Image: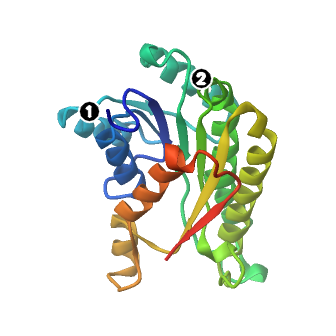
Amino acid sequence: MSEFSDQLVVITGVGRKGQAGEAIARAFCEAGAHVALVDLAEDQVQERAGALRTAGFVATAHAGDLSDAGNAEQIARDILAAHPSAKGKVHALVNAAGGFGFTGSLDTSDPAGWRTQFTISADTAYAATRAFLPALRAARGSVVYFASAATLPGGSTSGIAAYAAAKSAVLALMQSVSQAEVDNGVRANAVAPTAIRTALNLGTMGDKDRYVDRESVADVVLFLCGRGARNVTGQVITLQ
């Protein structure tokens, strides 16, 4: 039996090809999980799920705006209906939705850029966690959040204040969930990578030596959701 055999795993932000969410979804499938992929772009998330089904895995695609709590609740209902064998349980929620953005000097920055970073990272993580908590409690499951090495002590946040602040909010959310849900058996942790070797980063920043491979990110996420981390909660793992 694979570690995640027939367990339902929800992964957000699995849209564009070549991103971290795609590798995480593939790794969970290879470990036996049934995956539900969520993204704002319906055509892209359908393509990612279709590729997994073609490879023989169980994967469903769900499109919607996760920054809206009502939409997130509907997506949660749709996912559980699409996976009746899960019996209302979600073993893991991986909040990979988000995005990087430069906002420059604060005095000349666009306030819309600040709001966007909180919308795509903090708001989506909050609404998704809120929507799936009952199913996570039923499974005594795990939540993984995506922070950034820039938000940790010694990190550089010059020019990226909005991104860093939003990721700091994600870390605060993770700590709150880990403390509030420990008696319900739900664990919450975060990964804080430096730049990940994704198609988008390669396209915008070019190739360089110090990327974190997508597969390395996936390995850590699976560890945090697995039996080996059953007593790990409230922790941040830096990848560099």
Which residue is located at x 56 percent, y 55 percent? 98
Residue for point 67% across, 63% down: 167
Instruction: Tell me which amino acid carries mark 1.
Output: Phe
Front tag of 1 and 2: 1
Q: Quadrant of the N terminus?
A: top left
Left or right position of 11 against 30: right
Nearer-the-camera pick, 54 or 86 = 86
Query: Residue 82: where, in percent of width, then height?
Result: 43, 18
Q: Residues within 10 Å of mark 1 (few under 14, many from 20)?
A: some
Could you give the CA–CA distance between mark 1 and mark 2, rounded to whole angstroms?
24 Å
Left or right, 35 with reference to 165:
left
Q: Name the residue beneath numbered marker 2.
A: 74
SS at badge 1? loop
* Rendered residue at 70%/62% (across/down): 166
* Colour style of the rendered protein structure: rainbow
Tell me where residue 34 sits by quadrant. top left
Query: Which secondary structure lies at badge 2?
Result: helix
Nearer-N-terminus badge (1/2): 1
Please tell me which residue lies in front, 32 or 215.
32
Can see residue 92? yes
